[in-house]
Structures are given as C-alpha cells and as structure tokens.
Amino acid sequence: MTDQAAPVAPRGKGWLGLVGVGAIGIAVLFTPRQEGTLHRAYPDPATHGEPWTICTGHTRNVKPGDTASDAQCKAYLAEDMQVAAATVARCIHVPLNVNQAAALYDATFNEGPQVVCGSRVQAAANAYTYPGMCANLARFIYGNHRVMPGLVNRRVDNIELCSWPTSNPQLVYPAHWSAKP
C-alpha cells in the first residue's frame, strides 16, 4: 500500500478521471464541451462554408438552413461517435485504456480518419508507444491550412485526456486484436 495521493483532475476538467464509464461514454461527455451544440446549421469556421455543421459537430448531409431537435442532436452524436470508434478500431491494433480510446474517438470525430489511419498517431500506438501516440495528436491543429486556436485548445485537452491515468481497469481492444505485447 502507498501513501501517494491519487491524481486529481485539473480545475475545470471534470471529464478527466471518470470511473466506470466506457470510452464512448467519456467521448460523448467530452465532445460537446469541446464542440458546443447548435440546433441550426452553421458554416465551417475554417472555410466559412463547406462542410456545414449542425448539433455537436455533425456534418453528414447538412446544408444551410437545416435545423435539428435535441433528440436528433443526441442521435447524431451517438452515430458519429460510433463511426469514430469503428475507425479507431480499424486502424489501431493494440489495446487502449478508456481515456486513450476516448481521446482518439474525439480527435477522429473532429478531424477525420487521418488522425488514426496512416498517421504518426497510428504508428506510435501500434508500436505500443502510448506517450508518443498521445503527443502526436498535437499535429491536428489546422483548418484550411491554418492553425486554428480552437483546435489547438482541443488537442491540448485530447492529449491531457489521452495521458490521464485511469482507475478503470477496462481496456478497449480492437476486434482483430489477438497478440500480447
């Protein structure tokens, strides 16, 4: 037994250190804090046009003038997070703890499959270099070829979540995982 204190989440980071919540559950709590939720379609902040977005970052089939209810927004977020989780599972071939998985789900949801497929994030993860996996999320801060302050802040939070110790013993295994390190 140790007298060392358990890590305490930084002030204002209540989403860190959630116990007993799965990776998608963490991501579904984390993402709206990062993304915000608007019930009316709005243009991409980087391009001031495409892709149009609604709710909590949903972009598929969204056009100017679209509106959505709370229930539609929740359904879009759940669907979008499942797509992100499936992408992570397809490209990351090692087990992740729930915080690592949630951070990758959010970053993939926000930036697309290139976060975990064919990237340095993927190479580090699949080499069991988890600190490098988390650190390489910092590369995804550009929108329309310019640094976006909102993406910088979001990647800082993604890295912090990815690196945060968890007391949840659950690991997220890709469906095709069969090896041990």
Image (cartoon, grey):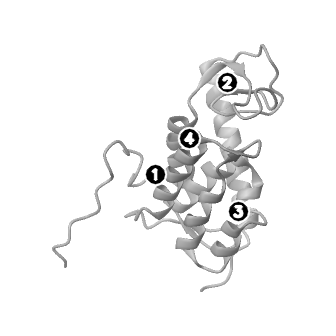
Q: Which of pointers 2 and 4 lies earlier in the amino acid sequence?
A: 4
Q: Quadrant of residue 114?
A: bottom right
Q: CA distance from mark 2 to mark 4?
A: 16 Å
Residue corresponding to mark 3:
89
Q: Quadrant of residue 44?
A: top right
Q: In front: 67, or 141?
A: 141
For residue 12, say whether it is visible: yes
Q: Amino acid at mark 3?
A: Ala
Please tell me how crowded label 3 is: few (under 14), some (14-19), or many (20+) other residues with Cα within 10 Å.
Answer: many
Residue corresponding to mark 2:
72
**Percent position of residue 119, x then y:** 74, 66
Local SS, label 2: helix
x 54%, y 38%: residue: 34
Residue corresponding to mark 1:
21
Q: Which of pointers 1 and 4 lies earlier in the amino acid sequence?
A: 1
Q: Which numbered disc, 1 or 4, marks the residue closer to the eye?
A: 4
In-image side of 175 versus 99 (left or right): right
Q: CA distance from mark 2 to mark 1?
A: 23 Å
Q: Give the residue furthest to the left.
A: 3
Q: Are marks 2 and 3 in contact (CB under 8 Å)?
A: no
Q: Which of pointers 2 and 3 lies earlier in the amino acid sequence?
A: 2
Local SS, label 4: helix
Say the numbered circle drawn on residue 31: 4
In the rendered view, would you say 156 is above or below 121?
above
Please tell me how crowded label 2 is: few (under 14), some (14-19), or many (20+) other residues with Cα within 10 Å.
Answer: few
**Percent position of residue 99, x then y:** 49, 59
Q: In front: 29, or 111?
A: 111
x 71%, y 33%: residue: 58
